[in-house]
Amino acid sequence: MSPYDPSAFPPFAVTVDLVVLTVRRHELCALAVRRGEPPFQGRWALPGGFVRDDEDLAAAAARELVEETGLQVHDTDASVPSAGNDAHLEQLATYGDPKRDPRMRVVSVAHLALAPDLPAPTAGGDAHSARWAAVETFLGQTGDGAGALAFDHGQILADGVERARSKIEYSSLATAFCPSEFTVGELRRVYEAVWGVVLDPRNFHRKVTGTPGFLVPTGGTTTRQGGRPAQLFRAGGATLLNPPMLRPEV
Amino acid sequence: MSPYDPSAFPPFAVTVDLVVLTVRRHELCALAVRRGEPPFQGRWALPGGFVRDDEDLAAAAARELVEETGLQVHDTDASVPSAGNDAHLEQLATYGDPKRDPRMRVVSVAHLALAPDLPAPTAGGDAHSARWAAVETFLGQTGDGAGALAFDHGQILADGVERARSKIEYSSLATAFCPSEFTVGELRRVYEAVWGVVLDPRNFHRKVTGTPGFLVPTGGTTTRQGGRPAQLFRAGGATLLNPPMLRPEV
DNA sequence: TCAAAAGTGTTACTGCTACACCCATGT
DNA sequence: ACATGGGTGTAGCAGTAACACTTTTGA
């Protein structure tokens, strides 16, 4: 059997689904949209849609992200600093159980997007209702309960959250949750929200400022968090943290 | 726009491609098959094939693995020890560039398999020719040269090798390259081959035997490597290594 | 003056590297 | 006897955790 016989192959629909994460009010939140028609009508789901005929997977994910949130995707090799409302986007995993969509065979290439807290939650999106919800809202649900996400989106969300939690350990990705300029304290609160832990501010400060290429000072300061003025930083060029940021045990 | 309108979607072919890695003669090797027809006729490619109509992605990958190598897939939550010729299998990434196959739109869900060195390289496989080749053979090739892999398989192989290299740092996956019973020295030679480095045998021994759940002694010994008899071990239940095995800098 | 958050110094401990050294076998 | 690989002991160092302490603002 040829592995690439162009005749006689089973037809699939291919979609992209998005796990869009942000940190709001000290909580890790995910973007969810309400389904307008069956199946799972009225239930919450992850944003997503069909991949177009001439479109790369990453391009489809980026297009859906813009449609839902107005967020542009970070230039991966950009020396240009972030404009302030752009997001990190990466492929997460692909879900293809034959029964995951009751109507037809759909393979979904899930993507993970990390975004700063947006002033207007879903500006520029479609007319359908959308919301930011704490990830616990959906992760706490077991299986197919009415509060759970549609399809296998609960599993996809769980995988995305786990990826984000582990990736900020050894990369500088946590800065994707921050605005273009941020303080060390704001970055620490991102780690605390994503991991659901409390970190020592003193040791955290030493760690992130002592890692070459992680943060570059802009020269400015701010008191928007109260207390003594804090230096403002931008994300530096380094993407890998070595040694990694350690997540507390329990 | 509904994200799941069952009418009017562009049809895709969905395949699985396999990066099958093993360690032979102190080298990290990948399984390659020779293409019998155009495009890329006569060139080497990764094994793979269409996902069937009623088949999960992981099942398709496992089926292809059996067809090509005779390897069974490890039970993920098995308390049963390995039978000796079973492999680790995990999803790697999905490749969907519109032009990756010149004939039609094909989305390939690549999987990574890690296998012990097989006595009979491709027993039970298809009739077409297959071989184990050092990964450098294909990774060294630039772009579309005649020695390079077909399609985007060079990129897929590179991604799979990188995943294996990083994953043995913080997991016990390196044991998937070993037979069911192995010595500490044999495990060390796996790390050395995958990373292309030399490790200190004394420190390595302390590290792996001192990590709870990584290795469990079988009680037996062997002298198949020469020298003093070495204890035999099985892979333990632990999957995550904490602290991780450190890959030397340069 | 006080609360709040930023930032520095110091000590104790963990885990790694490097290397000296001994052990048990085959030839 | 000696080569080969297996395995233990130990000193020095890097990086972290825990926490006392100072700094600079707003109320």
Image (cartoon, coloured by chain):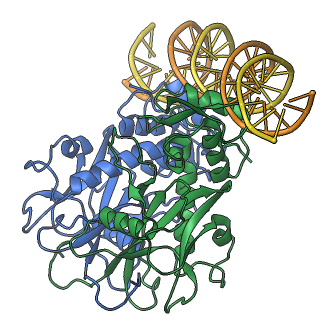
Chain colours: A green, B blue, C orange, D yellow
Residue B77 can be seen, yes or no: no
The front one of B210 and B98 is: B98
User: In this rendering, is residue B36 above or below A82?
Assistant: below
The front one of B4 and B73 is: B4
Image quadrant in which the N terminus of chain A is located: bottom left
Find residue B14 and report its horizontal and vertical position in percent.
28, 75
Q: Residue at x 25, y 82 (%)?
A: B11
Q: Which quarter of the picture shows residue C7?
A: top right
Residue B12 can be seen, yes or no: yes
The front one of B219 and B180 is: B180
Q: Is residue A26 left or right of residue A36?
A: right
Q: Residue at x 69, y 70 (%)?
A: A140
User: In this rendering, is residue D15 above or below B170?
Assistant: above
Q: Residue at x 56, y 40 (%)?
A: A182
Q: Residue at x 42, y 60 (%)?
A: A71
The front one of B23 and B90 is: B90
User: In this rendering, is residue B118 above or below A122?
Assistant: above
Find residue A199 and report its horizontal and vertical position in percent.
71, 40
Q: Which quarter of the picture shows residue A186?
A: top right
Q: Is residue B11 left or right of residue A79?
A: left
Find residue A150 and report its horizontal and vertical position in percent.
55, 81
User: In this rendering, is residue A140 above or below A205?
Assistant: below
Find residue B127 and report its horizontal and vertical position in percent.
17, 69
